[in-house]
Amino acid sequence: MYISVVWGLPVESSIYFLELIVFVLVMSIVAQWLSNRLNVPIMLFLLLEGMLVGPEILGLLDPALFGEGLAAIVSFSVAIIVFDGGLHIDFKSVRTIQRTALQLTTIGVLVTFIGATAVTHLLLGLQIELAALFGALVAATGPTVITPLVRQIHVNHKVSKILELEGILNDAASVILAAFVFEWIVSELSGFDAIFFILQRLLIGLTIGTISGYLLKRFLSGGSLVTDQSARMITLTMVTGTYVISELLGNESGILAVAVFGIMTGTSKIPHKQALKEFKTDLVLLMLSLIFILLAAMLRFEDVINLGATGVLVVLMLIFIVRPASVFISCYDSGLKIKEKLFISFIGPRGVVPASIATYFAVKLDFFNIPGGEVLVGLVFLTVIITVVMTGTLGRRVANILGVIPMEILIIGGGEVGKILAERFEKRGENIVVIDNSEEKCSRLLKQGIRAVHGDAEDINVLKAAGIAKAKYIVATTNQDNTNLLVSQIAKSKFGLKEEQIVARVNNVENLHAFWDLDIRSMSPQMTTALVLDNMVGRTSMFSMCEVGEEGNILEIRVTNPNVVGKAIKELTLPENSLLMMIRRGDKSHIANGNFILEYDDLVTIIGEGDSAQGVADILHR
């Protein structure tokens, strides 16, 4: 009989499970504190804590004593986490990347499955059946890891949504594929039975998830009878019910069902959605902590050590050969930049789903007297540990090197000025959110793949929902000076944005001084147009500078690259259609010329067509 370390109680005692919850909560708090303090993803600390308290080191927690209850805990937790991931996906705002994400969850999963199977079979000499089972288990990236990771790194919106959507959908695809391979091993499925197995699971998951999404929308539209609290309880009950019903109809179809359920809820216009998101965020952290600690505690060091250097080599080949091949093949026509594809290739952590299913399959393989279960579990856990540690510790650094961490810019007003500005920022790769009180304008922006929030920008809650707390810049572009002025004041007084972070459009020239008196950087379209036209008349150089074109850019960037400092401009290999115009050093400005020697912290003005200006900026700034 297991005796509780802390309280000295037998495992059968009900207080033991409360003790476990307190234990996990304390470790979760410690992990959260370390994560915030060291700016490292929380999953790393949860993994370390789980291994530390498990039977292999301190022996404070033995998940094996939970028996079948462990599978129930993991299943419930994964269902909540996958639903939460889907809840944050709005198909209307990710239309431009839907195809890419779907290709990653179909073509990408297939390429990863084939590659992982081949690498494992050839390097480890594992039987092709077990190699295929491993390939199926690691074919998916884990939403339990990717979602908090990309939100912490703040990569550009397009890349983050591709990764999140891929993680949610291909987790389901991987589970179904793994279940199919397992049945093939133990039941020798073939021909029509094999095809029927996969199609049946897909149909069950899609159907149950769709029905649940429809029913939840009907339930939550019940008027004043439904409060935020009851909406949370209804949703939690339906998530659990959706998973259970789908699993009863076809094993391993539950994850797909809750993923579809979450995406339908996230895309639908339903009351209490924000309350659901806030509640699920807290619950997900608890579930994430619980399953990561429990599964890490299940790890047997012997299973991993027995794999030796060859096992590590297999995982490294998955990371640096199989995953990039999967991404580049899947995204060949996606319109993603090379650097974005490279970042997506690097972010491929495996999560709790393959680890928990591998343990389950290992037990079943032993039951059928099929050897190799220990190797399978060890290899899967090794893959999870290495991929989580590598992406968790190096993710932000890789994102910085590849330049996929953008500025967060909030635009007030989705009229023509706001729309054109949003399009330009979007092309630059920045994270844009537009607020407008016109539903039609918001819909138009969403169709272009630009995030838009429908509401009154003068409402603090609307600003919070749009993410003003994370915004680096706020640009007020409406045709109402009162709105632009008030929003600028709110940004300064309530959210602490500095003078250089706020820019406003002034429609009436007479109101310019009202903005200037409050230290708000502003411009008047009429005044600016008059000044530009004035300079165009008889000044051809100014005319050519103003006519860079829709694809042109004028940037200011500081010189921080040590490989550039101390070199003359003529020694640099700069992109075509780019020009260094002026260098500001201290209080003095210098006209750029080929013999000018660049120094650290010089502020350089660049003009260029297309991406050439940004190309120069990437050379000068590191």
Image (cartoon, rainbow, N blue to C red):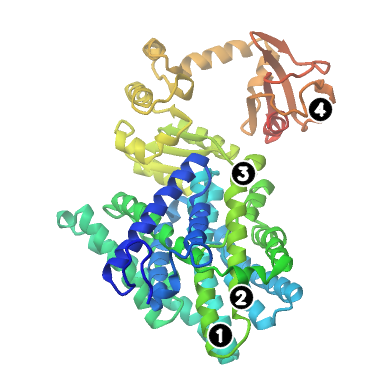
Q: Position of residue 489 (x, y in %)?
A: 35, 22
- Circle number at residue 596: none
Q: CA distance from mark 1 to mark 3?
A: 41 Å
Residue on which disc 3 sits = 399
- Circle number at residue 572: 4
Residue 112 in view: yes
Secondary structure of the residue carrying numbered label 2: helix
Tags 2 and 3 in contact by the CB under 8 Å rule?
no
Disc nearer the start of the sequence (4/1): 1
Instruction: Rate crowding at label 2 as few (under 14), some (14 to 19) or many (20 or more) other CA atoms within 10 Å.
Output: many
Question: What amino acid is at disc 3?
Answer: Ala
Q: Residue at x 58, y 73 (%)?
A: 377
Q: Depth check: 21 or 590 in front?
A: 21
Disc nearer the start of the sequence (2/1): 1
Residue 192 in view: no
Residue on which disc 1 sits = 365
Q: Position of residue 153 (x, y in %)?
A: 53, 44
Secondary structure of the residue carrying numbered label 3: helix
Disc nearer the start of the sequence (2/3): 2
Q: Depth check: 598 or 261 in front?
A: 598
Q: Position of residue 191 (x, y in %)?
A: 60, 90
Instruction: Rate crowding at label 3 as few (under 14), some (14 to 19) or many (20 or more) other CA atoms within 10 Å.
Output: many
Secondary structure of the residue carrying numbered label 1: helix
Tags 4 and 1 in contact by the CB under 8 Å rule?
no
Disc nearer the start of the sequence (4/2): 2
Can you tell which of label 4 and label 2 is closer to the viewer?
A: 2
Instruction: Rate crowding at label 4 as few (under 14), some (14 to 19) or many (20 or more) other CA atoms within 10 Å.
Output: some
Residue on which disc 2 sits = 376
Can you tell which of label 1 and label 3 is closer to the viewer?
A: 1
Q: CA distance from mark 4 to mark 2?
A: 52 Å
Question: What amino acid is at disc 2?
Answer: Leu
